[in-house]
Amino acid sequence: DQQVKQNSPSLSVQEGRISILNCDYTNSMFDYFLWYKKYPAEGPTFLISISSIKDKNEDGRFTVFLNKSAKHLSLHIVPSQPGDSAVYFCAASEHGTASKLTFGTGTRLQVTL
Amino acid sequence: EPEVTQTPSHQVTQMGQEVILRCVPISNHLYFYWYRQILGQKVEFLVSFYNNEISEKSEIFDDQFSVERPDGSNFTLKIRSTKLEDSAMYFCASSAQGAAGANVLTFGAGSRLTVL
């Protein structure tokens, strides 16, 4: 049951360039989407979120885009920094079941010098 | 910065044994959660807890699992009789509110459970 899919298990980007991480979902009841970042031996850390009533949310170097018709969201990191190297998880929740996040399998981002 | 603390960081147990994983959520948070991640798989929701009762649980959270808030600071996950497939990283999380739209979960670093 893969309601949230991250089809790229890994991504390598040069420092200073843009990183684009993608996420697709199948459940049309999802109305809130989040990105979490995870370093080894640590728990997931919240990065940025977006409500289904918006199509873009920006926070510093991080921007999340939501395309509801395509059931697709993406996280843009620009410029990418070596400290951004981590596993990035896309997560979603349904209205009314807000405490239950459905996660994707994650994309490992490596930012090279 | 406030954090969610989990103990132990790693526990090894024999199949059939009981295990208790402990969590200290952020002090002013009211909603508590357990998630788990089996090696190589996605993070999965187990249970949410509010006002001293379970508010949601997944299919994974069967009768072998229970949660408790024994005092004002701890939140525990008990697995009564562990199975090999319970081997995973267990993450505790807490949030100030229950609505994801207005709220973010803060996760602990996880407790790795290995069942032999």
Image (cartoon, coloured by chain):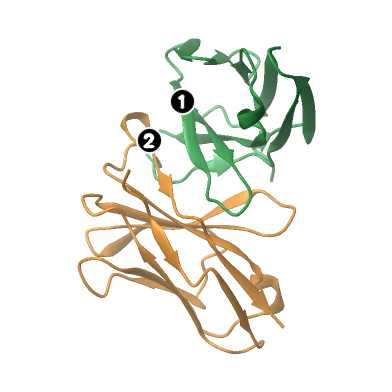
Chain colours: A green, B orange
Mark 2 and mark 1: span between their CA atoms? Answer: 9 Å
Q: Position of residue B7 (x, y in %)?
A: 45, 70
B86 in relation to A56, above or below? below
- In this view, the residue in front, A74 or A85, is A85
- Quadrant for residue A84, please give it: top right
Q: Is residue A32 visible?
A: no
Q: Chain of mark 1?
A: A
Number of the label disc, if any, that sits on residue A49: 1
Mark 2 or 1, closer to the camera: 1
Secondary structure, mark 2, is helix
Disc 1 residue type (three-letter): Ser
Q: Which residue bears the numbered disc 2?
A: B100
- Quadrant for residue A86, please give it: top right
Q: Is residue B58 visible?
A: yes
A20 in relation to B6, above or below? above
Disc 2 residue type (three-letter): Ala
**Classed neighbour count for the residue bearing mark 1: other residues with Cα under 10 Å, few (<14), some (14–19), many (≥20):** many
**Classed neighbour count for the residue bearing mark 2: other residues with Cα under 10 Å, few (<14), some (14–19), many (≥20):** many
Residue at 59% over, 32% down:
A27
Question: Do the CB atoms of the residues marked 2 and 1 lie less than 8 Å apart?
Answer: yes
Q: Position of residue B91 (x, y in %)?
A: 50, 58
- In this view, the residue in front, B14 or A13, is A13
Residue at 38% over, 37% down:
B104
Q: Is A55 on the left-hand or right-hand side of A39?
A: left
Q: Position of residue B11 (x, y in %)?
A: 58, 77
Residue at 45% over, 54% down:
B108
Secondary structure, mark 1, is strand
Extreme-front residue of the structure: A113
Q: Is A61 on the left-hand or right-hand side of A97?
A: right
Q: Chain of mark 2?
A: B
